[in-house]
Every structure is written in C-alpha cells, then in structure tokens.
Image (cartoon, rainbow, N blue to C red):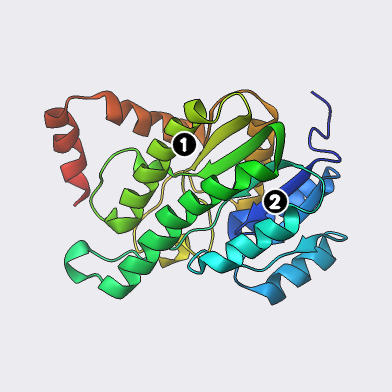
Amino acid sequence: MTSAPHASRRIWIIGASAGIGAALARELAGQGAQLILSARDGDALQALAQEIGGALVLPLDLLQRETVEQAVAQLSEGPKLDAVICTAALYDPTPVSEMDLQKAEALVRVNVFGTLLVARLAPKLLRKGGQLALFGSVAGYFGLPKGQAYSATKAAIINLAETLRIELAPDVDVRLISPGFVRTRLTDQNDFNMPAMMEPEDAARAISKGLAGRSFEIHFPKRFTTLLKLLRLLPYGLAFRLTSRLR
C-alpha cells in the first residue's frame, strides 16, 4: 500500500457538508483524490471545495429524488467514478413514545430510502470493480435502550449492504462503514456518556485506510465496536439482561 492509496481516484461523497463526510473529504483530498461533494447545504460545500483546493459541487437532498437523479445524470456525462460514499443521515434522539412522527418519517426516508436510491443509481457511474460505501453504525448492531428510530434505520443499512455485497459482485465492491461514537453535530444531541468517542479526523483516517483494504466492513474504534459485535452473538435472554442496565 502506498502512502496515498486514493491518489487520482474520482470519489463522490454524499453528505460532505459537515461531520465525518467533510473530514473524509479533507483526508482524501490530501491524498490527491478528485472529489465530487454533495449535501443539502450548497454554501458549506462551496466553502469546503475552496478549502481543499477544488472539487465539483453538486448539492442534492435525499428527500427529493429528482435532485439525486439530476446529479447522477450530470456525473454520467463524465469519466467513471472509482467510489461513491454515502454518509448522509438524519438523527433525532427521542424516545419512541415521544417522537415527532413527521421528523421520524423524514429520518426514515433519508436514512433508508435515500440510501436505497443511491444504491439503485450509483452503480452505473462506477468503473468495473469500483466501490459503493454505505454508512451503517454500531447503533444498528443490536436494539439498545434510547436507540430510537435511528438505530432501526442503521440496522436496515447493514442488511442492505450485506445483500448488495453479493448482488452487485463482482462489478461493484460494496463496503459497509460502521462508526462508533464520533464527535459531530449529531452526537452533540446526545445527553448520555458516549464511550470511546473519536474525532472526525480520526474517523476519516480509519475510513480511508479501510477502503484501501479488502474487508467488507470498516468499523471503529475496534476496542468498542468489537464488544458490541459480541453482544450480537449472545442468546437474547442474556443480551437483554445486559442491555436492560442501560435504561
């Protein structure tokens, strides 16, 4: 592996205006990648493009299907892409009994249907063997108290990525990215202690390294994510006894 494994790669990052997506754009641009940046906030994307020395900016909203289709149509006129990375997600840490159903519907539409839309349209933009990277979360590993609708959507993305890994092979190299707690405007909404918190820049380096490797799932930090993976292996009775302590 070279010191800049993503040099000259054409990579489309969806959800690049802030948080992990923006940090990943900075990391990959520093390695010489040619980036396409998308999110709802066009001004933030333009500022980021200027900061990293240039990028193609294509604002879109995963709640508006036509904006995604327009971006895909524009990109289809250019060279094939090496990777499409979909980081975009909504988050609303509210107990199910108190949730705003309108917000919950938007969350499910962005996190699940929006990702499905990207998975449906993006492969035609990729070169043979190009990467489609979808963002799950360790929140999708097991149903935890205070997990809310967000955790359910991330469980759906994990399942979707597992399906696509087989369905799209060998033409598309599907990857699943499962972060633990990363300091972003999403996790800033939480009112509980978040173990093994990472900075976005560290998360971006882990993702860059993982995409240059061969593993299907890129999960981090491993000292935390491995414990949650073990929880999935336990019988439900024992797992529920353990997780009930989190109420």
Measured as percent of width and height from the top left, residue 120 is found at 53, 47
Q: Mark 2: which amino acid?
A: Trp
Q: Residue at x 84, y 67 (%)?
A: 50
Q: Which residue is mark 2?
A: 12
Question: Foreground residue, 33 or 141?
Answer: 33
Left or right, 3 with respect to 230, comes to: right
In this rendering, the answer to whether 86 lies above or below 166 is: below
Measured as percent of width and height from the top left, residue 134 is found at 53, 43
Q: Residue at x 42, y 29 (%)?
A: 226
N-terminal of the two: label 1 or label 2?
Answer: 2
As measured in the structure, the alpha-carbon distance from the residue carrying label 1 to the one carrying label 2 is 18 Å
Q: Is residue 198 visible?
A: no
SS at mark 1? helix
Q: Quadrant of the N terminus?
A: top right
In this rendering, the answer to whether 197 lies above or below 53 is: above
Q: Residue at x 59, y 67 (%)?
A: 67
Q: Residue at x 65, y 43 (%)?
A: 124
Q: Is residue 114 visible?
A: yes
Measured as percent of width and height from the top left, residue 154 is found at 39, 47
In this rendering, the answer to whether 32 lies above or below 222 is: below
Q: Which residue is mark 1?
A: 161
> Would you call the spot at circle 2 few (<14 residues within 10 Å), some (14-19), or many (20 or more)?
many
Measured as percent of width and height from the top left, residue 239 is found at 19, 32
Question: Foreground residue, 236 or 194?
Answer: 236
Left or right, 66 with respect to 72, comes to: left
Q: Mark 1: which amino acid?
A: Ala
**Quarter of the rendering containing residue 159:** top left
